[in-house]
Image (cartoon, rainbow, N blue to C red):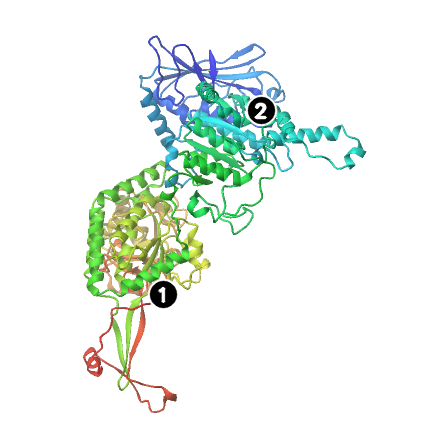
Amino acid sequence: MMYSDGAYTCRQGKLDLLGFGFRPQKDIGIQVLVMRYPSSLVFHERRLWKEEALRRVASGETPRVRALVKKTGIIRSDWSVRREGQTSECEESEAEVGAVHHSPVTKLLPSYTNRCRVEASTVHQSSFTTSLKSAWHFQLVLRLQPLHFETDEVLNAKKVKLRSELQDPGTVTSKGTTMDPSREFMRDVKRVVVKVGTAVVTRPDGKLALGRLGAVCEQVKELLQEGIEVIFVTSGAVGVGRQKLRHQRMMNSSFVDLQRPQSDLDGKACAAVGQSGLMALYDHLFDLLDVACAQLLVTDNDFKNPAFREQLLDTCHTLIGLRVVPVFNENDAISTRKAPYKDSTGIFWDNDSLAALLALELKADLLILLSDVEGLYTGPPSDPKSKLIHTYLKEKHDDMVTFGEKSRVGRGGMTAKVYAAWNAASAGIPVVITSGFGSKGLQRVLCGEKIGTLFHKDANRWVALKETGAREMAVAARNASRRLQALSTAERRQALLDVADALEANEALIRAENDADLEIAHQAKTSPSLIGRLTIKQGKITALANSIRVLADMKEPVGKILQRTEVAEGLVLEKTTCPLGVVLVIFESRPDALVQIASLAIRSGNGLLLKGGKEAMRSNAILHKVITDALPKSVGPALIGLVTTREEIPDLLKLDDTIDLVIPRGSNQLVSQIKESTKIPVLGHADGVCHIYVDKAADVDKAQRIIMDSKLDYPAACNAMETLLVHEALVEDGRLEKLVFALQSAGVSLYGGPRAVEKLRLPKAANFHTEYSALACTVEIVEDENAAIDHIHEFGSAHTDCIVTEDNDIAEKFLQSVDSAAIFRNASTRFCDGARFGLGAEVGISTSRIHARGPVGVEGLLTTRWLLRGDGHLVSGDRGVVYTHRNLSNEESFKSLANGDASCNGSAH
């Protein structure tokens, strides 16, 4: 019998830890998974972290054990506690798959949940916890029925899938985040080299950082459990030895000796003293985690011998096969170089370059260099102006990066790491430099989070050689908008038609990218309402293309003459429409919003900057590419810029000299935050808490149809009904019961205000100002239309509100009194939409009280300018000028223009 990280290995075969089956030979009957945990593990440094881990194993909460439960028929478990040869057995228990399994576990495990009951009278927790050095052990034995046989290739494929689909909350990206496109190769990583720098191994005072080292070892253990092979490279021997020798010299010196100048300690001696102590520490830490490790000391001269390199490869493969972690370190004590911590010659010259060399020799899939900073910065990390480089591109960053001082304790610091990382990446080994101070750094890297600095041979796929900054992007959009305005009406119309055709031609590609976004959203357990907004449904692309064609056929909005005035004889003034300039739109996770906003920008001649929700990252990217590729070459793709990171938003909000309007589509909080952060005018699209008030004079059947359409047609829309107000007369005659029954029969969850709770026995609404964006709404009973109006003003969002009544006087009172962007009578709130209003499309629905309110179409993206045509007219103190200020009709004005000038379609703004 051999215990190997929880796997019971025997002559006949090996149980697959990930639960996808095992590879038995012909006489296998039952496989056994055994986990042993000594007491020193549980109570090491007075922490119960391992106790919690075992509790999760027992309750089936970890994906590894949960996968085993799903794949097997019956699970039998035996719990036992023993000390110095004495064993206290607990009764066996059995549970069918899917049943709640109450294991009679020893009292050593507290009852964290009712899924894992703790019962044992022979062992007392208090006496156990006070005897930390006792040789107590407890073990869990899971007897599993054999699984179906599968090949190695199938098993490996399933393991990769498991890591991406059944991830432990401690090893996945933080909630709401997704795998960065530049890190997607992490899904296929099976072997990783981890190098720990001296700054991670030691504290600022030179002593060992036991907490950090313990955390790193725990992360290595978790990687092993996920089926990832780990090769460990450590620095710190010289630093550990120097600390020991300094302490010894101090203890053996007299007070007089200590007053004299102290000579520097020899690096080789420090390495010789420190290597044994450092390895002993790793051996102890890994042993506490039931992980075996092996020390391998090498020098650069060793690698000159082909036989050595071949033997090294064989030894490492053997150790990895035995689930032993190889721990490498340069043997500085016997290095032939005079000053190995300064000399940079040879095959490798420090542990960073050693790690890179080993990654190549052992054919690793990834090299992780752990440092005391988050990664590579453009300057010293302590400089506030320095920025973290997420993906290193030598052609771009080589001259940009300014290195600070070398490591406080190591040999080369960041300079050595960058050189080693670039060499490894050039040879095809991806490298990530990141901080070793976090508790889940390795897991976050392997889950594809955008942390640290990535070195990759294909870095140019993700990093532009010349990145466009916020100002450059805005200026480019403005210049492109001026070129767009110079086009004729027919040319701008054709540009929109080309965009519509391109969307339909690329529908399959767009839907594929949207499906990828949806898959990530489902894995992140995103709310159904958000998934509904994110989904591009069947027929949506065609509908969007048709709406663009409607917009193209609209009357030319730019250059429209709003007013013509004769100022004086022969001096004619015109007020015309023109684009705003550059508009920044921050919108929610609705990919179709990008299409509508972009088409409106093209129609109105505006430059556009877009920032969509991260949940729709892929959908937005492909839609942006399809649209910009279809623009006229004379205009260029810079007309519509796509902002991809949240970090760029603050810089854009400072550009009040370049960006002319900000439209945030989201919550009141978002709108308020943006208003506080910028001097640019803000067109706020806030919450959609829409009301329907059913008056006593309402036709109940008509009211029911309106209510059902307003709630059920698209519950996630901002114009869906969220609050139903009813006149108290409907309670008395039973009409309210009919409306409530209809909603509940359709699956709508109802929450009541105080009066509705009392009359209808509904659960209490948490807040009247609630936008459910789902199959739910609030119901409240009011005294009359005046009470309904007051309720809407107090709790509404000034979006869309409706009255259902046959009384004309009450209806007009409601329409004139409610202060909302859209007020309806006897019509569904879902009509509040730019396309349905005949605007072609909408950039959003504004609840602000500025130039545009309600659905904002082309006209909301236009402003005005004045064109004055004269013939040598002078003010000259107003002497000799006779002002007529006469309004002119189009015919009269054209007659008054001696040169026959016509209004232009637009000009540079």
Looking at the image, is mark 1 or mark 2 earlier in the sequence? 2
Is 242 rendered above or below residue 871? above
Q: Residue 116: percent from the left, percent from the top?
A: 46, 23
Element under label 2? Answer: helix
Residue type for callout 2: Met
Residue 249 located left or right of residue 562? right
Of 193 and 114, the residue lying toward us: 193
Seen from the viewer's position, the closer of residues 685 and 477 is 477
Residue 28: give x, y in percent of width and height. Answer: 36, 10
Amino acid at the residue labelled 1: Ile
Judge whether 785 appears above or below 387 on screen.
Answer: below
Q: Is residue 245 left or right of residue 835?
A: right
Are there few (<14), some (14-19), or many (20+) residues within 10 Å of tag 1? few
Q: Nearer the viewer, mark 1 or mark 2?
A: 2
Residue 789 in sight here: no
In 3D space, how far apart are the residues under numbered discs 1 and 2 (Cα atoms)? 70 Å
The reply to whether callout 1 and callout 2 are in contact (CB within 8 Å) is: no
Query: Residue beneath label 2, please?
Result: 279
> Total number of numbered labels?
2
Q: Position of residue 188 (x, y in %)?
A: 37, 31
Q: Residues within 10 Å of mark 2 (few under 14, many from 20)?
A: many
Q: Is residue 87 visible?
A: yes
Residue 407, labelled with which disc? none
The residue singled out by tag 1 in the image is 850
- Residue at the image position 54 percent from the left and 33 percent from the top: 350
Q: Residue furthest right?
A: 256
Q: Is 271 in front, or is 743?
A: 271
Q: Secondary structure at mark 1?
A: loop
Task: Indicate whether 517 appears above or below 843.
Answer: above
Residue 349, how many percent across, how many down?
Answer: 54, 33
